[in-house]
Image: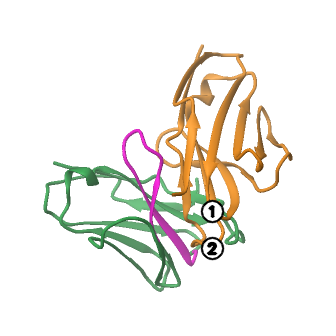
Amino acid sequence: ETGVTQSPTHLIKTRGQQVTLRCSSQSGHNTVSWYQQALGQGPQFIFQYYREEENGRGNFPPRFSGLQFPNYSSELNVNALELDDSALYLCAIFSDGKRNTGELFFGEGSRLTVL
Amino acid sequence: EDKVVQSPLSLVVHEGDTVTLNCSYEVTNFRSLLWYKQEKKAPTFLFMLTSSGIEKKSGRLSSILDKKELFSILNITATQTGDSAIYLCAVEARGGSQGNLIFGKGTKLSVKP
């Protein structure tokens, strides 16, 4: 139990629609990273938020966007969904006191299927 | 381009066997290498390695890093069915945003009774 909660756990959308995925942590960590894990692949870094600002971005188009709120919960928004967006979306926070390491705690993920 | 390559991609063993999982990497300004275990959804942290030649150990699992040859191995001795999972290797580079890990595709380990 990492204390990282993601919702929804599963959802199905159609091409062209928009989706919002949510992430929160018990302790209110100020840094959150989002990853996309396609079937048979390792997780790929989408972006990171630190104190409500985007603090690094991977190779994802602008239709992937995010927000972080004052309570440090976070959202991942994806517009104009494509079939290839079907994946497990993982939210991750640093374990307490370890922001200067790569030791991340992951949530259980949101599995998105785009039809 | 930074990359992480794991081998084998899948492996089937019997309980009690010892396995070695491999991870090679190419990354600019290496900072650390991490191993995660993914059973269903959330990857769970196993080890973080930053220095060559120093073995990290936790129970039946151990790992070591070779920064000269750019690889790491994860050993699991006396495997159990509960070790069945995908094992992910990731590297972190200095200068990038912390929390930006570059993952390999993983090794799917199946342990048969």
The magenta region covers A29-47
Residue A31 is inside the magenta segment = yes
* Whether residue A30 is situated above or below residue B4 in the rendered picture: below
Image spot of residue A17 (x, y percent): 15, 63
Q: Residues within 10 Å of mark 1 (few under 14, many from 20)?
A: some
Disc with the residue nearer the chain's start (2 vs 1): 1
Magenta span contains residue B57: no
Q: Residue at x 43, y 43 (%)?
A: A41
Chain letter matching colour green: A
Secondary structure of the residue carrying tag 2 is loop
Report the number of numbered marks.
Answer: 2
Residue at mark 1? B28
Is disc 2 in contact with disc 1, using a CB cutoff of under 8 Å? yes
* Circle 1: residue type: Thr
Image colour for chain B is orange
Specify the quadrant of the image occupied by residue B69: top right
Residue B19 picture quarter: top right
Residue visible at 65% across and 32% down in the picture: B21
Q: Which residue is mark 2?
A: B95
- Frontmost of labels 2 and 1 is 1
The amino acid beneath tag 2 is Gly
Residue A40 percent coordinates (x, y): 41, 38
